[in-house]
Amino acid sequence: MEEVKVIGFWTSPYVHRVTWALKLKGVEYEYQEEDIWNKSDLLLQYNPVHKKVPVFVHGGKTIVESGIILEYIDETWPQNPLVPTDPHARAMARFWIKFVGDKIQNFVGFYKRTGEEQIKAVKEAQEYLKILEDHGPEEKKFFDGDNIGMTDLSMAWLAFWLEAMEEASGVQVLEANSFPRLHAWIRNFKQVPVIKENHPDHTRLVAYFKRLREKFTKPATT
Amino acid sequence: MEEVKVIGFWTSPYVHRVTWALKLKGVEYEYQEEDIWNKSDLLLQYNPVHKKVPVFVHGGKTIVESGIILEYIDETWPQNPLVPTDPHARAMARFWIKFVGDKIQNFVGFYKRTGEEQIKAVKEAQEYLKILEDHGPEEKKFFDGDNIGMTDLSMAWLAFWLEAMEEASGVQVLEANSFPRLHAWIRNFKQVPVIKENHPDHTRLVAYFKRLREKFTKPATT
C-alpha cells in the first residue's frame, strides 16, 4: 500500500470532504494540520499555484483542489462508490458540485457583513439556497440516492459550517419552513457514522467565525 | 443511436470544446446556433440555473457546463480517449482545466481595458500565462501526451481567441520569446485536422471582440 497523506486545516469544509471520503472508503491516511495563517514551505512546495489546503499525497504524488481529489479517490479506491454509475446522473452530480463551488461566496457572504449589506447578502444566500432546495432530495435520503456520495460531501458546508456562520453573525438564513428538503438532508447527513464521529466542534467553529467576522466587519483604520 | 444535440454560439470557446470533442470521437450531432444576446425560451428551459451555452442534449437528457459535458462525452464514447488513463495524470489534467476555467478573466481581462488599466491587465495575464508556460508541453506535442485531449481542448482559447483579442485591442500578450512552449503547442494544436477545419473565422472573431471592446471601454453616459 502506498502512503496516503492529507495536509489540512481543521475549519476547512474542503479538507473534511477529502478525509470523510477516505474514511467512507476505509482508506488509512496520515493527517497533517497546516497553520494556514503562517503557511509552511511544505505547503508552498506541494501547491505552488494556489498555496491552499487540502493537499493530498498518494505514493509521493500530489493532488490539489478538493473536487479533483474526490474524483481521484473514487477512481483509485472503487469500494463504496461516491458518484452514481449512470453517466447522466454522474454529470448532474458534478454540475451541483461545481455550482456550490463557484457560488460559495454568494451562499456565505452574509456572515462577513453587517446592517443593510448583511440583509442584502442574506437575501442573496436564500435565492441561491432555493435553487439547491428545489434540487434537494425529496424521496431519497441523499442527493444522489440512498447512500452518501460526492454531492453530499460537497454540500457539507450546509450542515456544520452554515449553522456556525448563522450563530456567529446572529441571523438565520436556512429557515426550516422555507427549506424543508435541505433540513431533512442535513439530518440524514449528520446521522452517517463517519460524519457524526468526525466533524468540527460546533463551539470552536462558532468562535472561529466570530473572529473572522470581526476581522471582515472592523472599520478600516485611518 | 440516441440523438445528440449541441446548442451553441459561434464565438464561444466553451462550445467549440464540445463540438471538437464530438468530432474527435466521430459522434454525429445536430448543432443549433443560439442568439446569446436574445436568449430563447428553449435555452432558459434547458439551462435554467446558468442560462448559458453550450447546452448538450443526449437522448433527451440535458447537460450543461463544458467541462462536465467533456467528461460525459469521454465516458459515453470511449474511443479516442480525451483524458489520460493514469489516475494521477488524469487528476493533473483536471487541475489545469479547472485552473484556466477559474482564472479566465485574469487571462483575458486586458482586451476590455484601456490605458494604465490595460497595461496592468496585460501584466497580470502574462503572470498567469507564465504558470501555463512552465507547465506546457516540452517534449510531447500536447498537454497530456502525443494525442490531443481534454486539457488541449480547454486551452484552445489560447490558440484562436487570444490572438483575436490581441488584434482587437492592439497589444501583444503572448510574446513568442517569453512563451516558446505555448507557441509550439498552438502550432501543434492548429494542425490537428478536426481543429484546422472547424474553428471560428479569424476576421469575424476580431470584429466581434472589437465590438465587445468598444462596449466595455465606452465612457458611461451621463
Image (cartoon, coloured by chain):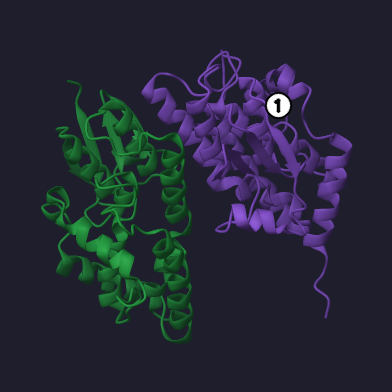
Chain colours: A purple, B green
Quarter of the rendering containing residue A43: bottom right
Quarter of the rendering containing residue B104: bottom left
Residue placed farthest to the front in the image?
A1
Q: Is residue B58 visible?
A: yes
According to the image, label 1 marks what residue? A177
Q: Residues within 10 Å of mark 1 (few under 14, many from 20)?
A: few
Q: Chain of mark 1?
A: A
Left or right: residue A114 versus residue B79 is right
Residue A70 vs B135, above or below: the answer is above
Left or right: residue A205 versus residue B86 is right
Instruction: Give coordinates of residue A9: x percent, y percent.
Output: 74, 45
Instruction: Give coordinates of residue A207: x percent, y percent.
Output: 88, 46
**Image point 43% across, 51% down: which residue?**
B96
Instruction: Give coordinates of residue B9: x percent, y percent.
Output: 24, 51
Quadrant location, the C terminus of chain A:
bottom right
**Image point 33% across, 38% down: which residue?**
B70
Residue A93 vs A164, above or below: the answer is above
